[in-house]
Image (cartoon, coloured by chain):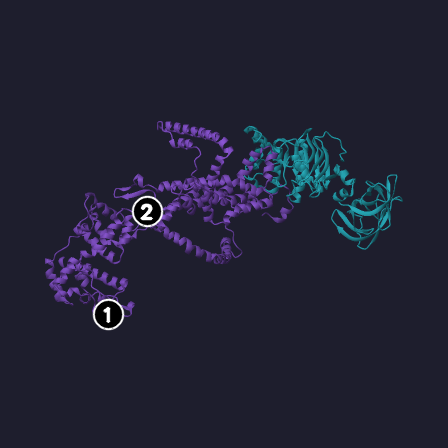
Amino acid sequence: MLDNQPNDGFVVFDRVQKSYDGETLVVKDLNLSIGKGEFLTMLGPSGSGKTTCLMMLAGFETATHGDILLDGNPINNISPHKRGIGMVFQNYALFPHMTIAENLSFPLEVRNMGKAEREEKVKRALDMVQMGEFGGRRPAQLSGGQQQRVALSRALVFEPDLVLMDEPLGALDKQLREHMQFEIKAIADNLGITVVYVTHDQTEALTMSDRVAVFEDGRIQQLAPPDQLYEEPQNSFVAQFIGENNTLEGTIQEIKDGIALVKLDDGSLIDAKPINVDKAGDRTQISIRPERVEINPDLGASAHTLKAEVLEFIYMGDVFRTRLRVAGNDNFIVKTRNRADQQRLEPGTQVDIGWLPQDCRALDA
Amino acid sequence: MTDRSAAETTGPDQFIGATPDNALRNAERADAGPVLAADGTPLKKSLNRALRLSKLRALMLIAPLLIFVVVTFIAPIADMLFRSVENNIVADTLPRTIAALDDWDETTGNPPDNATFEALYKDMYRAVEAKAHTRLGSRLNYELTGMSSLFRKSGRKVEDMGEVFQDQFEDLDGFWKDGENWNALMGTDSWLAAMEGWDTSDKKGQPPFEMRDGLAAMLPQTATAFQDYAQFIQRVDEKNLARQDPWALVYSALYNDLTSGADVSGYTGPAVAELQAAAAAVDGFETVDYRAAFVDIDEDWADPEVWKTVRLYGPNLTNGYFLNAVDMQKTPQGVEMRPENQQIYITLFWRTLVMSLAITGMCILLGYPVAWLLANLPARSANLLMILVLLPFWTSLLVRTSAWKVMLQQQGVVNDTLVWYHSTAVGKILDPVVTLLMNVVIGALNAVVWIWNLLSGIWGAVDVELFTYAALGFERLALINNVTGTIIAMTHILLPFMILPLYSVMATIPPVYLRAAKSMGATNWTAFWRVYFPQSVPGIGAGSILVFILAIGYYITPEIVGGTKGVFISNRIAYHISSSLNWGLAAALGSILLAAVLLLYWAYDRIVGIDNVKLGG
């Protein structure tokens, strides 16, 4: 529905719906086209339908309505084992009764591949994730990160064109997770495979993806490259969900020349860029990123400024985080870089804050 | 494991946590030498000391159960198992006879010499007084039929045997008639005085008999016989020794002493005149040929087989019960198989084993899908199914088994249903088809049997019974009082013991493995067989061990539905415990059963590994 980037449609969801109980739709009218070689992330809170979409693509769930096409062919009625899609599971799902090499050899065996060829491919796949020396071990003898690598190489060993990953890094600690993000991205780019990646971790989504589909309530709220998603959220859910966001509630006064004049609930007026508001009188949520707000700004006459009171000042090393009360909102955050000349504000100080009108987006309420 | 602060700042390839690698590294580090505690004692020692109190406390907690188990379980079993080799009764009852038999050369085919028969008389006389001869007879009857009646018969008459001497002594002098005179002769003065002063109303207070000095040297046999007699009267019978007359055995012993040259000339004690008169007269006494006397009671005493059996079972420990339990027997020539028509136990053991395996196999086949459903259905349905699985547990075993009797008998539910089915239109149309198919199958089976026989060199023999069965068509099926009945009923009864361990193992296998396998291109079957099944094997192992061990010792169900062909070795053990009272054989059979189970368990451990048995997650 928001598929604004034409591509070759390697994977296509065409008006797909899914219901488990016949009463509520878990996935509502999903339209999505994924290009060959693309790294697409499905991001969303739990229960938003992203995992269901992945499972429908893998073949473990059937779509209630609509078609899923892989490389132009509808795959709704093809059983999972014939789809040739690699998959990495949340808890790796390495077979505990097989060694690492046997685990990797399994998808090749079921394809009736010869022994020599199997060994060759297994070795190459393990080397790719620097696990070559662990072929004889059992999964239980490996650490979480090692198991993750094995699971990845097992999904890749039979050279699928499409690999699905269902929160593969969820069980790892932060350090390891960040490292693996880069590694997975690098491998995917090297092999040129198409990856559909499911996560609820927005940092992960922003770091790895070519495009991110933000899911909520069974729909894609926005489908865009990471930068666009962050800079230009299309609605208030995306703005809230991706990154840190300040919101101010208000009513549209007028929309003119691509600038909306918004009257905040405490009566002050500001300019904003109208995104999905239509007309004067609409309720709106103003969204401003904390790093785009300036304290005691020098923005020129066109910019509106607001009065604010400092409530809290937090030193975070590379940035300062200041919590302010702005127009009745006690949770207005401002992030400033830790520059040598940056002053540290005491709680209770009265300041002016301001921003450029294009950084301030008027979204649905 | 490693330094904690280092672990927090490691990159992704650092090994943190309890991985085997790290355990190995730690072990390597520990090889440097014994680690010492702060006070210089070895760490192991100091750790043991620290743990001792908690160990002691733990032991105290389990002590009541431990004592209970030892007293009510281990000790009785050990005692019962010991009975399989225990054989004191022969040596205890016939000590002199066993000793005398040492000299007997059984190869001559003659019964032993007269001295052995005399020893037998002495032993038997005492045994009869103690009423021990019938027990000995039953014991020896296990080994040679007829022994029981032989001992019973001989017991009634052996008392008469010595009376020849008693009569002659009494005829010689009335003095010998009276027990009081004997007491005065044999007892010490102090004992006689004590007897005088004894208040006879105090039954337990009778002064124990004391032998006069010198008598044992002068009249050794008499002294022993009298000592035994006095002891028996006083201790066992609890009668007044002053009022009793001696056993005939004492008279024959006195005769033996006097004729074998006891020197009474120097004797100066009481009744010296009577004793010397008797010593002078005994040479003219009529004597007894013990051998002739025994053979007169029963001709079997002349049969060397009887004596061979007595000698064979003389030792205190015997392997006879065990040999019996495997259809063998002891003969003077050594151990050999019993005659074909007496062999039952090996067949029975074999049948028990095969049927238990069959029951275990049936339980796996029937239980596996149920356990799979239990583990994979949604909670509501799974709970309902679980109740159905557990329902048999809440029903009495007897009720369940009896229900099978109702179901399976000739006029039972199953057969009646089949009869009804054959009478319906569907049955009438399908019966010829089924008969035809059955004949084809049976014909093929016969062909296989025939070829097999041909290859094994048994020319032309075809299992006729198979043909008969086919020809009979739809008879009422014999489903009970045979092997079929036992297997059906026992499979049903033991099924929960297979399902529950299977279920608890399957419940721990995440369904994601199957999905993973399918995503890699495995068909449903391959995914199940290569991925799911191997992970459920520990459950199969646990269930199989449980079912097999329960089945191999099962008693009630085979007893009720097994008829004669479908009973287990345990039914035979029960028979020997409660009906034939041959506890030694029962113990031997039980020991073999126990050994077989342990052996199978050991084999299972070697082949599958006991680590691979799980009763749950």
Say which of A110 and B560 sits in front: B560
Q: Sequence order check: which comes first, mark 2 or mark 1?
A: 1
Q: Is residue B319 visible?
A: no
Q: Which residue is mark 1?
A: B195
Say which of A166 and B448 sits in front: B448
Amino acid at circle 2 = Tyr
Q: In which quarter of the view is residue B158 placed?
A: bottom left
The 10 Å Cα crowd at callout 2, few under 14, some 14 to 19, many 20 or more, is many
Q: Secondary structure at mark 1?
A: helix
Amino acid at circle 1 = Met
The picture places residue B42, in percent across and down from the top left corner, at 50, 54
Q: In which quarter of the view is residue B466 placed?
A: top left
Look at chain A in the picture and name its colour. cyan
Classify the position of the N terminus of chain A by image quarter: top right
Q: Which residue is mark 2?
A: B321
Q: CA distance from mark 2 to mark 1?
A: 48 Å
Q: Which chain is purple?
A: B
